[in-house]
Image: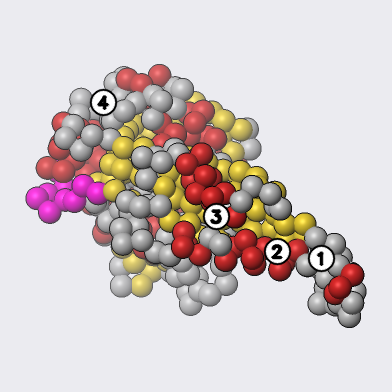
Amino acid sequence: MSEKAKEVLTDLVLLKSTSEDDAKPIVDYVSDRLKRLGLKTRYYGEKDRPAIVAEHGSGGVVLSGHLDTVPHGDGWQCEDGDIKAGHLYGRGACDMKGGCTAMLLAAENLVAANVPFTLCFTTDEETTMNGAAAAAKDPAFSRAPAILVTEPTAFEIVVKEKGLLQFNITTKGASAHASMPQLGDNAIHRMVSLLAKLEDLQRMPKNPNDEMTLCVDTIRGGTRINVIPGECTAEIDVRYPPDMNTESVLEQVRGRIGRDGYGLKILHELDPVETDASLPAVNVLKELIGEDAAVISVPYATEMVMFRAANKTLMVCGPGDPKICHCDNENIELAQIDRAAELYTEYCSKMV
């Protein structure tokens, strides 16, 4: 464990960066470190949620990570920045300020060795990914031999991600006094009936990484216990494989609940993305990690998909256990950050 990894990650974790926080402090912190390395920074996307791009030389690998986090949560048994048994705890420690720390440490090595590279840091990955989409138009992305997203994968190499579709369903009814339900039309009852028809799509498939999954994740309806609810809304998250698209997902949904009696609104969608696992850029990374390095597909989405139009050689590989992302007591082993920094330094050097 290096003192520098501990110092930088602690600084980043203590800079709160959810979508509700001001992004300027963490943007300024990262920008200042990049400028001290002699790198010129370029900014893309929304002014209050920018993406930072910093390039050294020309034609190097792009390392990309996000600085924003999900909200903290209330079930923690430790404080942000605590270190126990070589693990640093705090929201964002694993997802993914650990990877961002490794990028900053690798940048110091690469500048000293005069190896070309580009770093990209975004601040809206957990919400819109608009920053990544805007940053992808920077010429550094199209001329890079590879784009490597440093999300936590426990050093497995992700080359395939499922598509994402998030939508809501709204049922309308009529309010009435709960003592006289015959005078109203219960929107929650309507919603329960619709969701029951989606029961088969909500069952866990045998291969969730490769098959469609559908989860009902929020439901809101009613105003008071003694009032028949006049409206109810459920939010649904779908992850689907590359042989499907938004329309084929919605056709399955409508095939079960029909086309009338509810409203449906798409909230967010991302296409599936896949990189050819036989590409030299993948093999070089695999060789550097070691014989046991796994090349895998995952059910979640990263900013990898936002870079697809600029470059077809896309991977995700970083420090930390992806299973503890968004969880209470989120943490990362500090030694993994040092390992990631060394890996990124070697990879950028070999891909020149």
Secondary element under disc 4, as helix, strand or loop, is: loop
Q: Is residue 113 left or right of residue 84?
A: left
Query: Mark 2: few, some, or many residues within 10 Å (few <14, many ≥20)?
Result: some
Determine which residue is flagged by label 3: 256
Dots 1 and 2: beta carbons under 8 Å? yes
* Quarter of the rendering occupied by the C terminus: top left
* Left or right, 339 with reference to 194: left
Q: Amino acid at mark 4?
A: Pro
- State which region is magenta: 288-296
Residues tagged 4 and 3 counted as in contact (Cβ below 8 A): no
Which residue is the site of mark 2? 190
Residue at point 31% right, 28% down? 312
SS at circle 2: helix
Q: CA distance from mark 2 to mark 3?
A: 14 Å
Residue 185 got which mark? 1
- Depth check, mark 4 against mark 3: the one in front is 3
In front of the other: 224 or 171: 171
Q: Amino acid at mark 2?
A: Arg
